[in-house]
Image: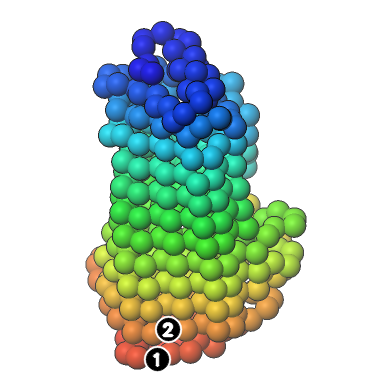
Amino acid sequence: MVLQRNKKALADAWKEACAAPSKATIVVPKGTYNLNKAFFLGPCKSPVVFQMDGILMAPSAAKGFKDGEGWVTFEKLQHLTITGTGTFDGNGGQSWGKKCKRTDYCEQLPINIRLNFITDSVIEGITTKDSKQFHFTVLEGENLLFTNLKIIAPEESWTTDGIHLGRSTNITITDTTIATGDDCISIGDGTKQLKITKVTCGPGHGISVGSLGKYQNELPVEDITVTDCTFKGTSNGVRIKTWQGSTDGVAKGMHFEKLTMDNVETPIIIDQKYCPWGACTQFEGKPSKIKVSDVVFKDIKGTSSTPKVLYLVCGAYPCEGIQLNNIDLKTTGSKIKGPAKSVCTNVKPEMSGTVNLPPCTTDDSA
């Protein structure tokens, strides 16, 4: 089924493909197609391939979307393949001017591609560009492969996380380039068995576990591996972030290995005093109660563009089982004022191999 240039074409093609008794393919051919919104609902009778060779273009104005809604949404599907060399263009330039500090403005912006309850599926080859909010949001996914993707937005674009995961299991993200104005990958509560490998991140805010602890009844995060990745000019490298004043929670079993930092502001971070835009002043002095444990930082090398090469600031429960193995980070660039610094609070990291870092201090000043 090949998409034609009319308003109902995509919906009609999906209806036909989803009802097919055997594997069906929807083709978006080369060309540019304006699309206000799309919702592809399953379950389908057979596997479906969404062959994306053209450009789907969102309207410039973000109107008619509920909080967290997708511009393009796939839901309740098994054996879905999204593939091709095409682009989902969120056309987000008009949406990035406002900050999110005192309003829910950013939450009301559409996510480029939302994947809800998708299992045993592959997303490969495509580009997502200039999303108004997150590029991908994955909710309760299982057995998913993201590979050979390009995720692009300007450095100044607010809240344009590349891939955000929540309550998902057995996810692989590999051979992907992400350049955004926020986290390249953000890992929300309930995420388990996640493998991130051969990702190039930058600009952006690095790869983050969290933020965690903002909401009640969050599920544990565990068994996370980030390996063979490169960070270029990001504000953070790899980061675990939990909100001040959070209720009890767990983040454990995380491995960050074979990483290259190129002019990264702070390469290694555990931040349990997380408070973006000053939005949690009511919790000031109230520690995070997310228990962080069994975290390995290994074979990490490169350069930091600020003195804080290591920032481990833990919460009410001291971080346990934090390992630093073969770390070689040097400071470089015009932002360097004073000697390099390792900040460590409520944590005693275990060091092995060659660790080229300054001694830990509790001095958190710049």
Which element carries disc 2, helix, strand or loop?
strand
Q: Eyeballing the image, is 202 above or below 132?
A: below
Question: How has the structure been colored for display?
Answer: rainbow
User: Circles 1 and 2: CB distance less than 8 Å?
Assistant: yes
Residue 312 pos. (x, y %):
51, 76
Question: Is residue 139 something one can see in this rendering?
Answer: yes
- In the visual, does 219 lie left or right of 335? right
Indicate the amino acid at tag 1.
Answer: Ser
148 or 187: nearer the viewer: 148
Q: In which quarter of the image is the N terminus?
A: top left
What is the number of callouts on the image?
2
In terms of depth relative to the viewer, which is nearer, 216 or 15?
15
For residue 324, the mark is: 2
Are there few (<14), some (14-19), or many (20+) residues within 10 Å of tag 2? many
Query: Residue lying farthest front?
Result: 21
Task: Find disc 1 in the rendering and name its residue.
Answer: 352
Above or below — where is 134 with respect to 293? above
Residue that sits furthest to the top in the current view: 6
Residue 100 quadrant: top right
Residue 10 in percent (x, y) is at 45, 17
Residue 277 in view: no
Depicted 33 relative to depicted 45: above or below = above
Q: Residue 145 carries which label?
A: none
SS type, badge 1: strand
Look at 51% across and 32% down and name the residue there.
46
Q: Residue at x 59, y 42 (%)?
A: 117
User: Mark 1 to mark 2: distance in Å?
Assistant: 6 Å
